[in-house]
Image (cartoon, rainbow, N blue to C red):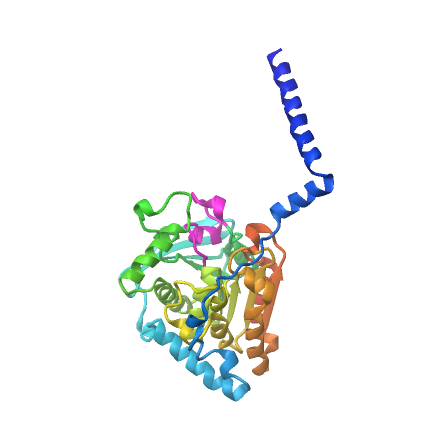
Amino acid sequence: MGLVILLVFSIMANVLVFSFYFERYSVSELFERFLNKNKIPELELPKIPDLYNKNILLLNFEKNVKDKEDFVEWKSSVSKKFIEIYELENVEKYVLENVKVESTKNIDSNILTKFSAKAFDGDEIIFYELKPNYQFESLQTVFIIPGSGNQGAADVLDLDSNYKDYFYHKGIGGKLVNEGYVVYVIENRGWGERTIDAGLHCKEPNVYCSGNVLSKYLANIGKDLFTLQINDSLQVFDFIKNKEYVDSDNIAVMGLSLGGGVVQGMAIVQPEIKSIVIASGLVSFHKVGGTGITPGMLEFFDFPDLVASLAPKPIYLSWGEYEKSNFRFEVETSYSVNIVKKAYSIMNAEQNIVVIFHNDEFNQGHTFDVNSIIRFLNDTLGEPRI
């Protein structure tokens, strides 16, 4: 009897609520309110006073490149300045030390190996190898740099993790291995298994806090987290290209979000990278208001200039149409795309650039578009020799 009375009161309450809304709004108005609640907000960029926009971007593409001859000289200047700003002059001397196999296990007919090693500054690097469980002499290889967040490599490899609810890399590592590639994934400093105990600064489930705290602390002592992440990744790349079963002539480097930024830096320094995948990872920080990972860089060039200087190397760029962060600017304007495309056109290499704006709503589109990436890798590395 009590349940019946409760049900009657519940129905009456719902009738009253809906009556209120239908008296206040028409059906069309209610539908419009629903759409407005779920639509992508208008992009609002910071208004930086003109005072701070003088004498910047001195080496940018638009100011310095008109033809192919200009491009070659400009590319060299950008590369040298990037290496100087991020103190990457000695990176070729760095090799991984004390590389250890931490574990090996079979996952879905593939072999997953976890490695640890010492970075050039003594910090512990953690990275994974996922390869097909069958005999082969050498295979094309993809090295993946994860985006920010405590999910780290587990997100890329779809491993059990306390942060699985926040995965946004779509387990792409396993999907690429099933295509016949060998895949490597690094843990970025500050996240994944390389998080720090940030004490009172972080409240769960803020999965981005650890790396942000580390970045600020390093800046306070004159070091740069972005530089260290590039250094770590270049050292692992050196390890990868010397593996006997890796086709060293066909290694792609792939990054999502922060990982895309690291990939851009790697590609400037390491010419042996065959092709580049940057997913939701290229944005003009001059236009959207700067970032802590560009100490002094905007005095000379912006990230679209940096990526433009990679021409004519095969490159894949993507964004989701539903992006809501700073990357929304790129979706609405194609600002960076237009600069990079001009560079590839000047170098007569339009066939080497692929640009994708995908309509995946997952994670607001801030994710990998797996099928188009596989097509790009097949085209630039050659289809895997399964």
Please indicate whether residue 220 sits to the left or right of residue 369 in the image. Answer: left
- The residue sitting at 48% across, 62% down in the picture is 46
Q: Quadrant of the C terminus?
A: bottom right
Q: Position of residue 159 (x, y in %)?
A: 46, 48
Horizontal arrangement in the rendering, residue 122 relative to residue 331 (left or right): left
Residue shown at 60% from the left, 63% from the top: 332
Residue 146 is one of the magenta-drawn residues: yes
One can see residue 382 in this view: no
Image position of 143 with respect to 58: above or below = above
The image quadrant that residue 263 belongs to is bottom left
Q: Is residue 318 magenta?
A: no
User: x and y percent of residue 383 in the render?
Assistant: 58, 67
* Residue most extreme to the right: 27
Please name the residue shown 32% across and 68% down the image. Answer: 95
Q: Nearer the viewer, residue 196 or 52?
A: 52
Q: Residue visible at 57% across and 82% down?
A: 346
Q: Is residue 87 visible?
A: yes
Q: Read off the magenta span.
A: 143-167
Residue 293, position as x, y percentages in the image: 39, 64
